[in-house]
Amino acid sequence: MLFNINVIWPLWRRIFRKQNSLTQACLPVSHRTLKFIFNIFFVFACSAACVAQSADTLRHKYLPTGLRIGTDVLSIVRSYAGEKFDGWEVNADVDFYKYYLAVDYGSWSRHLTLPTGNYENDGTYFRVGADVNFLAKDPDRNMVFLGLRYGQSSFSEHLNYESTDVNYGILQHELVNSNMTGRWGEVTTGLRVNLWKGLGMGYTVRLKFMPRTQGGGELVPYEIPGYGLAANKIYWGFNYQIFWRIPFRK
């Protein structure tokens, strides 16, 4: 059988025209779909980039810029001023933008002479808390702050005194509290001023409250190292401090 192209060609032309018309009809739909997909992808990419940039900026903003270490000058002065007090205190804080993590550690001992005896205590204490700096954008890292502290101390107390008995005369008494624990809270405020390079000075005012003691013996707790008189439910404290700041970054 001979192949007659004149018979097949008209049929092929009709099929080709239908196929071409279908292709042309589908092209606008495909173009709109691709454009829609591209727009979604573009918006998603821009959003992801913005979120990543914001996260990097936020992370950089809250990275610590330095560590500040200092000591309480008043504790040193009191130790040599004949107040029968011996103690020292070190302070440290690190910044997270306008928030500062603060830690204090100190030693405290006192000797009091009573009319018929003497009282002694000895212990260590620490405080931990946070401050909010209201001068966060100050280039010199100066501070006007408000904060909170939790304080705890470990200490012992010793009381010797005399009494007179009609039958036995003068009697010696000894009362001891050992392995005592004291706890309290504080609201703090104050300022820090940069003087030269990393050297700074400042003060801290402390409103101490809710003292609690645990342990002890026959003696009612008299004084809590780091806090003050145990009988005072509210107690004021004041520190005048000198600091040196160690920078991590600008």
Image (cartoon, rainbow, N blue to C red):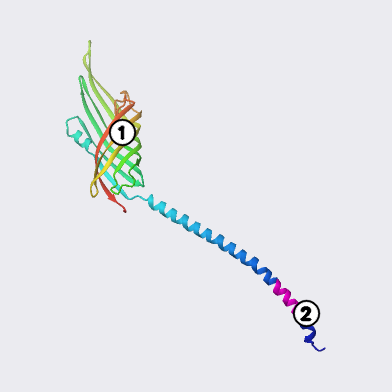
Which residue is at a point 23% across and 23% down the rendered structure image?
Answer: 160
- Residue closer to the observer: 150 or 160: 150
Q: Secondary structure at mark 2?
A: helix
Mark 2–mark 1 Cα distance, whole angstroms, equals 100 Å
114 vs 128, left or right, is left
Mark 2 Cα-neighbour bin, 10 Å: few <14, some 14–19, many ≥20: few
Give, as a single range, the part of the protein colored magenta: 10-21
Whole-percent x and y of residue 33?
62, 64
Quadrant placement of the N terminus: bottom right
- Residue closer to the observer: 87 or 200: 200
Among numbered discs 2 and 1, the one appearing first in the sequence: 2
172 vs 250, left or right, is left
Q: Secondary structure at mark 1?
A: strand
Q: Is residue 132 magenta?
A: no
Write down the residue under mark 2.
11
Residue type, mark 1 in image: Arg
Write down the residue under mark 1.
206
Residue 173: which quarter of the image? Answer: top left
Mark 1 Cα-neighbour bin, 10 Å: few <14, some 14–19, many ≥20: many
